[in-house]
Amino acid sequence: MFQVSVPQQCGCFRRSGKEASVSFENKDDALMHAQEMAQEMNSEFCKKHNFSVLEEGKDFIIVMAASN
């Protein structure tokens, strides 16, 4: 089982209705979902943060960093 999670949730994320944790049977599906989610968050949210995907074992974590 592969997990996609968003441990740090900004206000935009909380208001978006997106799930903070999703499980997948397949690594490729999990990675694709995480990358699409991070890309969507980068393009649709307020731009105060940047989002990227970090792989840790069977987990794909969407990490948040302040924008410059």
Image (tube, grey):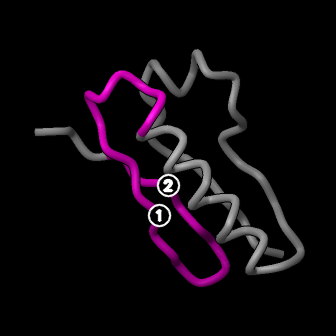
Kind of residue indicated by mark 1: Val
Horizontal placement of 68 versus 29: left or right? left
Q: Residue at x 73, y 68 (%)?
A: 30
Instruction: Please report the residue visible at 59 percent of the width from the left and 67 percent of the height from the top.
Output: 60
Reply above or below: 55 against 10.
Answer: below
In percent of width and height, residue 14 lies at 57, 22
Say which mark, if any, is on residue 62: 2
Which residue is at 69% across, 23% downward?
A: 17
Which element is circle 2 on? strand
Q: Residue furthest front?
A: 43
Where in the figure is residue 68, as x and y percent of width and height?
10, 39
Disc 1: CA contacts within 10 A as few (<14), some (14-19) or many (>=20)? many
Element marked by disc 1:
strand
Horizontal relation, residue 4 to residue 46: left or right: right
Q: Tell whether label 2 touches label 1 (CB within 8 Å).
A: yes
When asked about the image quadrant of residue 59, the answer is bottom right
Residue 41 position, x and y percent, is 49, 38
Image quarter where the N terminus lies is: bottom right
> Does 32 lie within the magenta span?
no
Residue under label 1: 53
Q: Dividing the picture into quarters, in which one does residue 35 lie?
A: bottom right
Distance CA(mark 1)–CA(mark 2): 5 Å
Asked whether, in this view, residue 20 is left or right of residue 52, the answer is right
User: What secondary structure is the magenta-colored segment mainly?
Assistant: strand
In the rendered view, would you say 44 is above or below 61?
above
The residue at the point 74 percent across, 79 percent down is 28
At label 2, the amino acid type is Ile
* 65 left or right, relative to 5: left
Q: Is residue 52 above or below residue 28?
A: above
Question: Residue 46: within the magenta?
Answer: yes
Q: Where does the magenta region start and end? A: 43-64
Could you tell which of marks 1 and 2 lies nearer the N-terminus? 1
